[in-house]
Image (cartoon, rainbow, N blue to C red):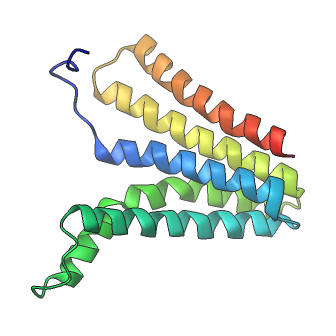
Amino acid sequence: MSDPPNDWERDERTVAWVYGGMLTGAAVVVASAKIATEPWQVTLYTLVATVVLWLAHSYAAFVGHGGRFDGGQLGARLRHAFAVESPILAAGLPTVAATAVAALAEASVSETGYVGAIAAVATMVVAASLAARRSGAGPAGIAVGALGAALIGGLLIAAKVALK
């Protein structure tokens, strides 16, 4: 296997936005297909799942940076870990907001779930498109990046259909 090209750099914030969109999409799919009986529950479950995932990733980042509880730097280390992982939390907010709007508009549980899944996919598509643009991709490269995210997002929507 060959090494990646020299210009290959991992943008951790973009990774977190795409990954956060996927995780939130999965949460909204499960909430709307298996857990919620009321539309507002889709929003609540998705919000709680997003926060828990952010906390889990923050803890993992803390441990990955040494996980030290001594030396009088615990607060600073934890704040840093929470900040580094904040894009995962931020990536979930469009989905949470979309499900809240759908619930307030008296959508059904299923409809609220579809709105949330579409918002999660849109978050992933935007993140992938912006990443491709920042890396110097032209319109075709940006479109392919967006298509890749949309295809992954399509799996989330297919899961929602299959779970129902």
Residue 102 seen by the camera: no
* Displayed quadrant of residue 147: top right
Does residue 23 appear in the picture of this structure? yes
Picture quarter containing residue 151?
Answer: top right
> What residue is rendered at 85% in x and 49% in y?
111
Residue at screen point 35% across, 26% down: 133
Q: Is residue 32 left or right of residue 15?
A: right
Does residue 146 sit above or below 62 in this rendering?
above
The reply, left or right, for residue 156 in relation to residue 66 is: right
In the image, 146 versus 7, the foreground residue is 7
Q: Is residue 21 above or below residue 84?
A: above
Label total for image: 0
Q: Position of residue 15 (x, y in %)?
A: 38, 43
Specify the quadrant that holds the N terminus. top left
Residue at screen point 41% across, 15% down: 141
Q: Is residue 35 left or right of residue 145?
A: right
Relative to the observer, which residue lies in front, 142 or 50? 50
Q: Residue furthest bottom?
A: 72
Q: Position of residue 148 (x, y in %)?
A: 52, 24
Counting from the top left corner in percent of width and height, residue 51 is at 52, 68
Q: In terms of image quadrants, where is residue 80?
A: bottom left
Q: Nearer the viewer, residue 27 or 94?
A: 27
Position in image of residue 144 (x %, y %): 48, 17
Task: Residue at the far left: name it.
Answer: 71
The residue closer to the viewer here, 163 or 99, is 163
> Measured along the vertical axis of the image, is residue 81 above or below residue 21?
below
The residue under the point 24% across, 61% down is 64
